[in-house]
Each structure stands twice: as structure tokens, then as C-alpha cells.
Amino acid sequence: MAERAVAFARRIVITPVTLAMVFAFVFGAILIAVTGANPLAAYREMVAGAFTGSGLRNSINRAIPVVGMALSVSVAFRAGIINLGGEGQMVVGGLAGSAVAIFMPGPGPVAMMAALLTGAAGGALWGLLSAFGQTRLRLPILITSLLLNYPARAITGYLVRFPLADEGSVLASTPVVPEAARLPRLPFFGGISMTLILVLIMVVAAAYVYQRSVFGYETEMVGFNGVFSRYGGVDVERRTMTAMAAAGAVAGFIGTHMVVGDAYRFVDGELVAAGFAWTGLMVSLLAFNRPLPILAAGVFFAALQIGGLAMQRSSGVSWQLAQVIQAVVIVALSARIVVPWRKGRDRSMDQDELVSDTEPVPVGEV
């Protein structure tokens, strides 16, 4: 029994993710020491700033879009699709949902639900443009999804400056979302948006779909090998379209939340400036596209960013150190930093752990 407990502990500790995080924090401590500050004191302020007082609310509030965008990335990645268009899908969906919440007549709850659904539909349609380009025109989805971010920003920028502009605002933005159409706030964590519950439901639903549905199985098959999947009877083109629509829908939903549940007006460039799409990409890579690890990694990255700001205020160490730690975690993980633990381990267990812990989720051609 004791040997099994020790083996389980080793499997948790001696993993690429854990080692990458330890390496990143050690590297960060060296940088802090070089600047003349105390690494332990700086990290203590980072933890306190992320998990105490208003910092806890800010960390959770930031984790909502980070986890959501990571789920969006994971849907496409599991299908072998490198979707770099999350930013555009989030912006288009966010503006579409915001417009419905602002201008739709009728009861506030109805407008709120219609806004979320419209935002998801807008993001899905924008994601389908890249999927259509690959399946029908043979345009690489990696390129088209990335390039479509720019027209998305340009189109939404034009709309909030002219047709949907708030004439009384000095910012390029829409009018304020009516209070009745805003997402309600929960009575804990200092009044977090109800989107927290919705994102948790999305994480559980994604875990179920990935593991126990035909869609999840066929999507993973396509991700491993598109040619083999086609011979096995999987409609690869259809799965590509479905995966991109799902990814865009999640991104559009998150974009709508950022307005209807947080900022209460769509400001040109604000969703992009936060960098949630690219942070979500890193979180999905760190979690190997698995929903529950995505939740943990998203909270970790959000706390790292919020704690970095608190560290700068209290100890004078730049908050950009948090970005350095994020980058080092991903680079170290990509380098497959693995410490083999061979003494007293069964050979077959070594082989199983090596495959499960060190192999990336493959990204195949579709």
C-alpha cells in the first residue's frame, strides 16, 4: 500500500508539467535576485495578491475568459486543427452579442439570453469561414484563421465608430448595456459574474463530450490521423466544420460575457488588448487540451497575472516577470523536461507513464 502511495506521488510530482513550472519559478527567482530584490518576498506578495482580499475576485474574474478561450482552442486542437483565429471569433461574437443586449426590445432576461446565443452564433460563423476555406478551397486553416483576426478587428472597429457608436462617449464604443440585460452577479467572491457557473458547466460538458460521445471519439480520431479516419468512415470535412463552429461558438460566448457580464459596453480594441485568446492558447497547450486540467491551468495563469501586479506594487518587481514565467513554462514543457525515475519501478509502468506523460496531443492533417 505504501509503495503504491509513493508511486502515485511520484507520478504527480515527476511530470513534465510540474517540472516545467518548477523550472520556470526557479528561473524567475534568479531574475529577481539579479535585480537585487528578495525572490521569496516577491513570490510571497504574488501569492497574497492573487488569493487574498480583492485579489481572489480579480483572479477568478480573469480566469473566466482564460479558461473559456482555452476550451475554444482545445476543441480545434483535438481535431488536429491549429486554430489561431480565437481573437477574431471572440471579437465578432462579442460585438454581435453586445448589439443584441443593447438594442433588443423586451424583458431584460430575454435580451441577455439572446445576446449570449447571438454571440456564440457570431463566433461560430466566423470560425466556419476558415473551415470552409480548408474543406472547400484547400486553404490552410492555420493561415486563414490567423489572417481573419485582422478583418474582424477592422469590421468591429468600424461598427463601433459609426453605426453602433455612442455619441456621448469619448471612446470608440457602443452605448452602455441596459442594466436589465446584464448578466447577474453571484453572491460570493465579491460578486463574480454568473458566467463562472456557465464556464464550469462548459468544462464538465467538454470532459463528457471528449470522452463519451461519438463527436469526441471521431474528433480525436481525425486529430490523430485524418487519412486513417477517412478510411474508417469518418466524415473528416464535416468534423472539421463542426469543430471550428464549436470553437468559434465558445470564443463568441466569452466575448459576449466580457461585455454583457463585465465591461457593459463594447470598446474598440479592449477585448484584444487583454490577450485572452493567446493566453488561452498557452493554457490549452499546458493542459494537453484536457478540460479539467485546462480549468486548473487557467486559474494558475490568471493568478500569476493578477499576483504579478500585486508583486510590482508591494516589492517593486515588474509584473512582466509573470509573463516571463508563463513563457518559460510553455518552453520548458515543449522541451519535454522529464526526469526519469527508474529505481524500484516496474518496466511496464515506465513505458505506460512515458507515453501518457510525455507525448503531446497530436495535431494531424485534415
Image: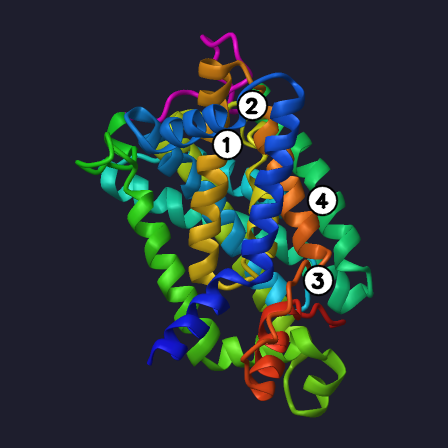
The residue labelled by disc 3 is 132
Q: Nearer the viewer, mark 4 or mark 1?
A: 1
**Horizontal and vertical percent for residue 78?**
60, 68
Is residue 153 positioned above or below 93 on the image?
above
Q: CA distance from mark 3 to mark 2?
A: 41 Å
Is mark 2 in CB contact (under 8 Å) with mark 1? yes
Q: Nearer the viewer, mark 1 or mark 3?
A: 1
Report whether residue 30 is seen: yes
The N terminus: image quadrant: bottom left
Residue with the mark numbered 1 = 305
Mark toward the start of the polypeptide (1 vs 3): 3
Real-space CA distance between mark 2 and mark 1, rounded to the nearest whole angstrom? 8 Å
Looking at the rendered structure, which numbered label has been put on residue 148? 4
Residue at (24, 36) in percent of width and height? 184
Residue 275 rendering spot, x and y as whole percentages: 59, 34
Between 295 and 202, the one nearer to me in the picture:
295
Where disc 3 sits, the SS reads helix
Amino acid carrying label 2: it is: Trp
Q: Is residue 305 above or below residue 5?
A: above
Label 3 Cα neighbours within 10 Å, binned few <14 / some 14-19 / many ≥20: some
The residue that disc 2 covers is 319
Q: Residue furthest front?
A: 343
State the predominant SS element of the stretch in magenta.
loop
Q: Which sits earlier in the primary sequence, circle 3 or circle 4?
A: 3
Does 288 lie within the magenta span? no
Residue type at tag 3: Phe
Magenta span: 163-178
Say left or right for 340 vs 197: right
Disc 4 residue type? Leu
Depth check, mark 2 against mark 4: the one in front is 2
* Direction from residue 315 to residue 353 in the image, left or right: right
Q: CA distance from mark 1 to mark 3?
A: 36 Å
